[in-house]
Image (spheres, rainbow, N blue to C red):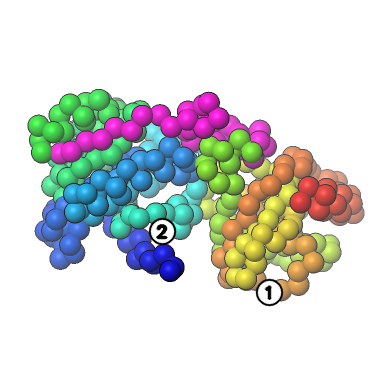
Amino acid sequence: MSAPTLPPLRLRRGLAPAGAHPGAGEQRGWVAAIGTFDGLHVGHRALIARAVSLAAGLALEPRLLCFEPMPREVLAAQDPPARLRNFRERHRALQGSGLAALQLLAFNERLRRLSGDGFLAALQAAGLRHAVVGHDFRFGRGGQADADWLAAVGPARGLGVTVIEPVLSGGERASSGLVREALAAGDFARAAALLGRPYAMRGRVQRGRQLGRTLGFPTVNLPLKRRRSPLGGIFAVRTSGVGLVAWPGVASLGTRPTVAGVEPLLEVHLFDLDRDLYGAELEVEFVRYLRPELRFDALPALVEQMQRDAADARAAL
């Protein structure tokens, strides 16, 4: 017997007061895993699983409540953290998680200035009945409230609170910071252990300048849609989507300095594939770091290096 198909994950923006919508989730209230959830590593997955389990026992709707942009992208605007997943990737990855809705809050000046009390009151007014947070969760103006505060005051205000202790992977506490560290070092095995799966990026193929085709290396171009990428350079990759399953290739992630590029772009040359993929949504899994992005004085030198990169990627795959 096949497993039941879960309904699509709904997207809800903002915090409307409970009863403002006719849906069952607003009438009964909801349980939420709350946090930034960049990367959706094994620690994040533990929070989500607990929220889904609690919601089932309480006959409430399970949701994930997160922020866009990420708070640190606003609080450290001059030096934001590398984004492991853009919003579309995160929404896609949560499909089938057991969650009913993704509750998305805009992290703006108004939200940043809310006190811990004010933020908690807004959540409860919108129907939150039980909060699931990590041990290092902080919220409210200046991070004045934390998981311990929430666990202390929540029950007195009619709010259930569950605090999840650190989740270990290979003896280290799973965190988005460690995933970024592993990716920056090209250690994809460590990143996969922390994430619970290989690291990948997803995007929709856009039309480029066709330069790769003229050089004998046609590529599919995927915009990053994140302020800072957690990795860069040349990689051996596998690509899936629109009938492709782990298709081997070589990818460049960077600004393409040899051809005066400016915006970061993920370009993937799929080996032995001649197919129009414009508009297709693809997922690119990073398998092996090959070298940093370089600037070449002339295109022939670039082509020679691309040939070596392709050979190295084939060997790695």
Question: Is 151 rendered above or below residue 69?
Answer: above
- Taking the image as shown, residue 181 lies to the left or right of residue 269, namely left
- Taking the image as shown, residue 13 lies to the left or right of residue 92, namely left
- Expressed as whole percent of the image width and height from the top left, the position of residue 38 reads 45, 42
Q: Residue 39 lies in magenta, yes or no?
A: no
The secondary element bearing badge 2 is classed as loop
- Residue found at x 81% / y 53%: 314
Question: Is 61 rendered above or below residue 132?
Answer: below
Query: Can you identify the residue that label 2 sits on?
Result: 96
Q: Residue furthest bottom?
A: 276
The amino acid marked with disc number 1 is: Asp
Label 2 neighbourhood size at 10 Å, few (<14), some (14-19), many (20+)? few
In this picture, which residue range is highlighted in magenta?
Answer: 159-188
- Residue found at x 74% / y 57%: 249
- Residue found at x 20% / y 58%: 25
Front in this rendered view, residue 5 or 236: 5
- Expressed as whole percent of the image width and height from the top left, the position of residue 226 reads 51, 48
- Taking the image as shown, residue 248 lies to the left or right of residue 183, namely right
Query: Can you identify the residue that label 1 sits on?
Result: 276
The secondary element bearing badge 1 is classed as loop
Is residue 201 at all visible to an observer of this figure? yes
